[in-house]
Amino acid sequence: MRLLILDAALPRGLAAIVADGHLRARRTMPGARGHAAQLAPMAEAVLAEAGIAARDLDAVAATIGPGSFTGLRAALALAHGIAAAIGRPVIGVTVPEAFAAGHPPDGRTLWVAIHSRRGRVFLHDGTALASLDLNDLPGATGIAVAGDAAIEVAARLAARGADVRLTDQRLPEPLPIAAIAARRLAGALPPLAAQPLYVDAPEARLPAAPRAAPR
């Protein structure tokens, strides 16, 4: 199976080619800005390096969040554009799924902690996804923490005396993303819409309708 992997959910853009479970090419761009302009050239570069034509892909896999509003939209827009041009599906993969697929079994529950805004995190505790203030983390023991907010979350839990281990996973990697996408494409995982996964309500709101002038 040949997959183009796109990820811009966290502070890094990623394009990669995974073929039959092997990483064939990879490009990354650090930082939280510029994904919309750079992801397309990165996708073109990895296809060329892997020697695979876009039409020979089986699918395009993209992370759907939670994460950066702009990054998610840029990666998914490109994924849908490429997929439409070649007549292939877009497979959505959540960021917690990608981290879980890359986490070796160790008997601990994996928490995925992702920076949100103003001292908040998106936290997946192995079962559910929530948006929390860092001061309102639930109690836990026997856990491992991954994600770009893992250091802050693990430190706060350790300060409470929790049995917590910090993993070395900070950003989603192409092979775990590909593994989840392949299982979803084969029907081994439930289908998932390849659309941005938003946890918080959007900050932007439509203007209120003007009030009618008194008669």
Image (tube, rainbow, N blue to C red):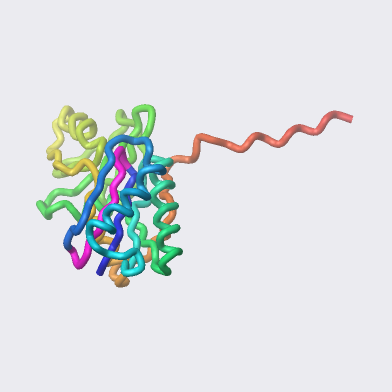
Farthest residue to the right: give it: 215
- Residue drawn at x 38%, y 38% as measured from the top left: 34
- Residue drawn at x 44%, y 58% as measured from the top left: 81
* Residue 73 appears in the figure: yes
- The C terminus lies in quadrant: top right
Q: How many marks?
A: 0
Q: Nearer the viewer, residue 113 or 88?
A: 88
Which x, y percent locates residue 45?
A: 29, 52
- Residue drawn at x 35%, y 47% as measured from the top left: 39
* Residue 94 appears in the figure: no
Which x, y percent locates residue 114?
A: 30, 39
Q: Which of 106 and 80 is in front in this view?
A: 80
Give residue 53's quadrant in the image: bottom left
In the image, the segment drawn in magenta is 10-21
Query: Taking 2 as reference, is 162 above or below it?
Result: above
- In the shown orientation, is residue 68 left or right of residue 28? right
- In the shown orientation, is residue 133 left or right of residue 180? right
Give residue 119's quadrant in the image: top left
Which x, y percent locates residue 101?
A: 21, 56
Q: Does the magenta stretch include residue 29?
A: no
- The N terminus lies in quadrant: bottom left
- Residue drawn at x 25%, y 50% as measured from the top left: 126
Q: Nearer the viewer, residue 43 or 138?
A: 43
Query: Taking 12 as reference, is 192 above or below it?
Result: below
Which x, y percent locates residue 52?
A: 27, 64
Farthest residue to the bottom: give it: 186
Q: Is the magenta stretch mostly helix, strand or loop?
A: strand
Farthest residue to the left: give it: 106
Give residue 160's quadrant in the image: top left
Q: Does the magenta stretch include residue 12?
A: yes
Query: Taking 113 as reference, is 59 above or below it?
Result: below
